[in-house]
Amino acid sequence: MAMNTAFLGLLQLLLLLLPPSLRDYLWAATSHHGVGQKLQVYHPIIMSAGISCPVLEARLTDAYTPSLPHCGELKGKGWFPLWNSKQDLVDHDYISCFEEQMSLVFDPVTNDYKNRPGVETRVPDFGSAYGFSYKDDSCPFCCNIKLRDELETLGYRDGDTLFGAPYDIRHAPPSPGHPSKVSSDYFARLKDLVQNASAKNENRPVIFVGHSFGGKLILDFVNSTPLAWRKQFIKHLVLLSPTPSTGFMEVVTNLASGPSCIHFDAAPHLALRTMWWSFASSLLSLPSQAVFAHEPLIVTKHRNYSAYDYQHFLAAVGFSMEGMLPSTKLALPTNLIIEAPMVPTTYLSGVGIQTIKQVVFWDGNFDIYPESVFGDGDGVVNWNSVLVFVNELKRQHSSENILFKFIKIPNVTHSEIAIQDNSLKIIMAEILEANS
Ligand SMILES: *[C@@H]1O[C@H](CO)[C@@H](O)[C@H](O)[C@H]1NC(C)=O
Ligand SMILES: *[C@@H]1O[C@H](CO)[C@@H](O)[C@H](O)[C@H]1NC(C)=O
Ligand SMILES: *[C@@H]1O[C@H](CO)[C@@H](O)[C@H](O)[C@H]1NC(C)=O
């Protein structure tokens, strides 16, 4: 006992010598678990970040017919970064080419989405935690960069103990009746990555850390694997504000006004709306009937639209008229199924931030910015939706006695959860706990 106290005193002293943020969460972690905790790297970690973070490279072949002559300049010149730097696109007057070359087309033969003819794409750096980056310098710590730095300070190393799973932001995970070759290939590579990461680390199972859309994809991936495989290879999921399948309003505002995650100050605000509509991912996580019921989500002078009226809303916005997508393809959330991952999970979310819960296009003109009505949430995801989603995951986990820990962090936004000092500390303490 006396020795323990002495050791505790020494540890406290040693912790004082560390940089303040590291000291605080190490101290938080040790005081939870007593002094015996190993602080060395233990389980490999695979990271994934939000939808603005993965990079996309493209290659243009002879089959590509540009709608503007200069969009064809890179034809036959090999791979180039299509979505990596906003400044590059502006400098090369490439935004409209970007829109064209990023857009997907729906192929009724395969019932799946594909690139436009003559455009080939790939996501670079699969496997690396460095495969994510913010696309301008407005947010140097976005895309889990700060979290990655903290893990490296602890001793994690990219390619050995630390990995990343960047994805093609345009595609949606496969679901019954909606195949996706790109997403199925991604899941297969991710399964390989998990097994490789584990094999490299004495067969220890991996910890996933996913933020926002990256967290959603990890959840969907885990749910696509056999239970026995999950139990063998996955130690823990750390989900940071994952976008819940129960839905959130930003999905609606992105469809109405163009994507907030891909946006250029130099371009008109609707410039990328048609491109966004062509993405399979743009229809994921629409506010669900199960949570939002008949609440008017979109208000106009003449009629309102609730979670029951997306077909009408999308037609009014002009989406269906683009002819890019047959109405049968609309994966509308009428029969929402929430599947829990059934492996130990920590789910962290901010709360207490003004979050859009309704938009008003009073004159029915969807081409102008709407007025917003706010409710609770993390600034992006509506709190009522988080609660329904989390409670269902918790229920499924507790029926099998599998850990599910929900941590709400007041006053931290969706994008700041892995940046702000206080919440980063909480996240790091959870990762250390999962590591023990
Ligand atoms: C996994 O390891 C195998 C064998 O070394 C390698 O061929 C494969 O590319 C690796 N896959 C991933 C996703 O790391
Ligand atoms: C639309 O919803 C608003 C806000 O809930 C309500 O005041 C209004 O009466 C509704 N309008 C119509 C046309 O139903
Ligand atoms: C959250 O922010 C509000 C407004 O700034 C403040 O009144 C409240 O005390 C904060 N809550 C916490 C738990 O930090």
Image: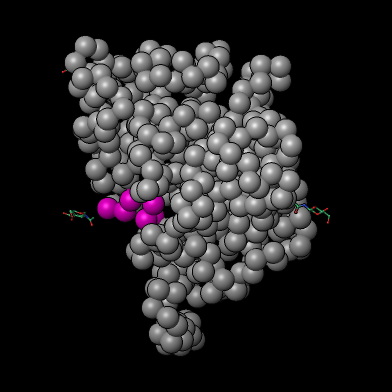
User: Which residue is at 32% across, 18% downward?
Assistant: 306
User: Which residue is at 35% across, 38% downward?
Assistant: 269
User: Which residue is at 73% across, 46% downward?
Assistant: 76
Q: Nearer the viewer, residue 41 or 95?
A: 95
Q: Nearer the viewer, residue 28 or 308?
A: 308
Q: Position of residue 142 (x, y in %)?
A: 44, 58
Q: Position of residue 416 (x, y in %)?
A: 37, 56
Q: Nearer the viewer, residue 101 or 123?
A: 101
User: In the displayed structure, would residue 292 be above or below residue 8?
Assistant: above
Res 310 → quadrant = top left
Tell me if residue 412 is in the magenta stretch. yes
Q: Position of residue 335 (x, y in %)?
A: 50, 17
Is residue 208 something one can see in this rendering?
no
Is residue 153 something one can see in this rendering?
yes
Tell me if residue 418 is in the magenta stretch. no
User: How many circles with numbers are drawn on the protein?
Assistant: 0
User: Which residue is at 32% across, 45% downward?
Assistant: 378
User: In the displayed structure, would residue 140 be above or below residue 312?
Assistant: below
Quarter placement of the C terminus = bottom right
User: In the displayed structure, would residue 290 be above or below residue 431?
Assistant: above
Give the left or right position of residue 39, taking residue 126 as reference.
left
Q: What's the magenta region? A: 411-417
Res 434 → quadrant = bottom right
Q: Main secondary structure of the magenta part?
A: loop
Check the image and tell me how it is coloured: one colour
Q: Position of residue 369 (x, y in %)?
A: 26, 33
